[in-house]
Image: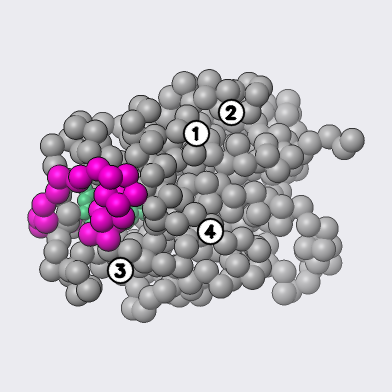
């Protein structure tokens, strides 16, 4: 039996990271987790242990700590990195841009420097559909031009993509996530928002659970069929599986051979939209939640939220064809799993 490949997962106790750890294990990889617990809890490690049947390697620390990162490479010799560790709240990034540039940009550079020094040249990177801004046409393709970022958070994702493209010694699978929701079907792991949630689904489930009084739908007068914004919601398990497909691709011998031969058709930086390819309005999401769970959502339509784009969803042709991945879980499953997780919190 060949040894399992070690994969370093930064931010591996976070929402998407923790689900990806499970999928990596399922696919025969050995995840090595580093997380600074800034936006996650150590209890997630216990839940992972329960689900995996063993306690995964976990190091509490920060990607900005270059001695720690270098030490991790020396000890565990990961063959690839999945880099989740980043701040992700749009509003917070406007209030504290330095914190975002330090963590999301300087942290990435520190990690890349350690990878280069330690001869690790494969990465899957968490980007976001936020790089498209308000697109002229939907669905958006990977070739759709990016727009000036509307927040420091968005700017850090754009800068990170440029940094990764320029460092062409590193093979990068850059995944532009649409709106990740849902939770593991066991409800043992899920999203753990800090304080008052900014995102729709955690705010909605907390409202139904009685933690928040009422959900405000941000704007009912947009140029969409029902007047509310449209997004491409994707189940976190589908998203986690996309990371495994991306990791698999980094290890396919055909591709590696082409890169070694300097084949110009094989770019060191590949970008994929990770969405379902279907857009739903905020009101459609609320209706789907009520139908899937039998619960009522207390909501009212309020003012627009500054910075929201009207409608964005993914063209998934490239990811379907090249990565061989497509989303499998529907909106009802996303809602059911999100609600089961909330009830378990
Ligand atoms: N919404 C409401 N009420 C709420 C929260 C959200 O109506 O209380 C609406 C928003 O206006 C939007 C939709 O629900 O139309 C989705 O909003 P989210 O805040 O859940 O997500 P965004 O589409 O705004 O995405 C943002 C960033 C992404 C980032 C993502 C996750 O733009 O880059 O949050 O942090 F990845």
Q: Earlier in the sequence, mark 2 or mark 3?
A: 2
Label 3, on which residue? 311
Q: Residue at x 72, y 69 (%)?
A: 266
Q: Residue at x 20, y 38 (%)?
A: 207
Say which element carries label 1. loop
Residue that lies at the very extreme toward the right in this rendered image: 1
Front: mark 1 or 3: 1
Front: mark 4 or 1: 1
- Quick check: can you spot residue 287? yes
Residues under labels 4 and 2: Cα distance?
Answer: 22 Å
Q: Do residues under tags 4 and 1 come within 8 Å of each other at their CB atoms?
A: no
Above or below — where is 34 with respect to 139? above
Label 2, on which residue? 51
Residue 301: % across, % down: 11, 56
Q: Earlier in the sequence, mark 4 or mark 2?
A: 2
Label 4, on which residue? 327
Residue 277: % across, % down: 46, 67
Label 1, on which residue? 186
Residue 328: % across, % down: 53, 57
Residues under labels 4 and 1: Cα distance?
Answer: 19 Å
Above or below — where is 121 with respect to 107? below
Front: mark 2 or 3: 2
């Amino acid at each position: 039996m060949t040894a399992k490949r070690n994969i370093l997962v930064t931010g591996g106790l976070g929402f998407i990271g923790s689900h990806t750890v499970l999928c990596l294990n399922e696919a025969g990889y050995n995840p090595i987790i580093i997380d600074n617990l800034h936006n996650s809890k150590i209890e997630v490690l216990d839940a992972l242990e329960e689900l995996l049947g063993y306690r995964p390697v976990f190091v509490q620390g920060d990607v900005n700590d270059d001695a720690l990162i270098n030490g991790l490479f020396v000890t565990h010799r990961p063959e690839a990195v999945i880099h989740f560790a980043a701040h992700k709240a749009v509003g917070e990034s406007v209030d504290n841009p330095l914190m975002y540039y330090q963590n999301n940009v300087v942290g990435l550079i520190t990690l890349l420097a350690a990878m280069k020094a330690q001869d690790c040249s494969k990465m899957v990177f968490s980007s976001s559909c936020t790089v498209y801004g308000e697109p002229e046409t939907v669905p958006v393709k990977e070739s759709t031009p990016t727009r000036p970022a509307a927040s420091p958070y968005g700017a850090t994702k754009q800068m990170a993509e440029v940094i990764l493209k320029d460092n062409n010694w590193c093979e990068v699978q850059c995944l532009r996530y649409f709106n990740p929701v849902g939770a593991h079907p066991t409800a043992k792991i899920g999203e753990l928002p800090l304080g008052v949630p900014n995102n729709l689904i955690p705010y909605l489930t907390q409202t139904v659970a009685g933690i928040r009084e009422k959900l405000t739908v941000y704007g009912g007068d947009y140029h969409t069929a029902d007047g509310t914004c449209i997004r491409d919601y994707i189940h976190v398990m589908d998203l986690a599986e996309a990371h495994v497909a991306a990791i698999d691709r980094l290890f396919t011998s055909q591709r590696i051979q082409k890169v070694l031969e300097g084949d110009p058709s094989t770019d060191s930086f590949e970008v994929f939209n990770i969405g379902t390819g279907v857009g739903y309005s905020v009101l459609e999401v609320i209706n789907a939640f009520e139908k899937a769970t039998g619960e009522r959502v207390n909501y009212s339509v309020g003012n627009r939220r500054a910075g929201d784009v009207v409608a964005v969803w993914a063209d998934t042709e490239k990811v379907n064809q090249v990565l061989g991945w497509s989303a499998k879980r529907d909106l009802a499953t996303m809602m059911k799993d999100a609600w089961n997780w909330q009830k378990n919190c």
